[in-house]
Image (spheres, rainbow, N blue to C red):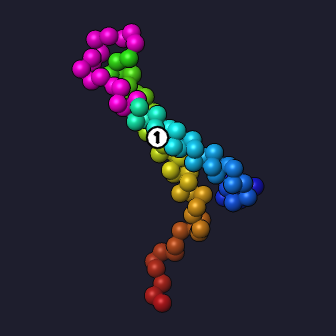
Amino acid sequence: MTLRTAIQQSKILTFVILGAFVWLLLTLFEVASTVDLMTGTTSFVGQNALGGIAGVLVLTIVLGALVVLYSEITESDPAPQSWPPSEE
């Protein structure tokens, strides 16, 4: 079973993936809003700027992976077009 078939047959899976995307997006905004860039790297205990930036970076990568996965699943034609294009 391919991912495309799984998504088409299981609507629950679609809602779970969409819910995970929304949850990660809200978490990304929450982490980004709590980063205090004035602390810099002076304090390594508790929340600091480096930890917040790393968290935002990791969440952005995960969200990007979900977007790429979704775009691959919804692609209707898996093969690229022929080159050079035919004149029709």
Residue 57 appears anywhere in the view = no
- Which stretch did the figure color magenta? 31-46
Image: 55 above or below 78: above
Choose between 86 and 59: the one closer to the eye: 59
Residue found at x 24% / y 20%: 38
According to the picture, the residue beneath numbered tag 1 turns out to be 25
Report x, y in % for residue 1. 75, 55
Report x, y in % for residue 41. 29, 15
Image: 7 above or below 31: below
Residue found at x 57% / y 63%: 75
Secondary structure of the residue carrying tag 1 is helix
Residue found at x 60% / y 57%: 73
Position of 17 with respect to 45 (left or right) is: right
Image: 22 above or below 56: below
Check residue 42 for magenta coloring.
Answer: yes
Report x, y in % for residue 46. 40, 12
Residue 49 appears anywhere in the view = yes
**Prevailing secondary structure of the magenta residues:** loop
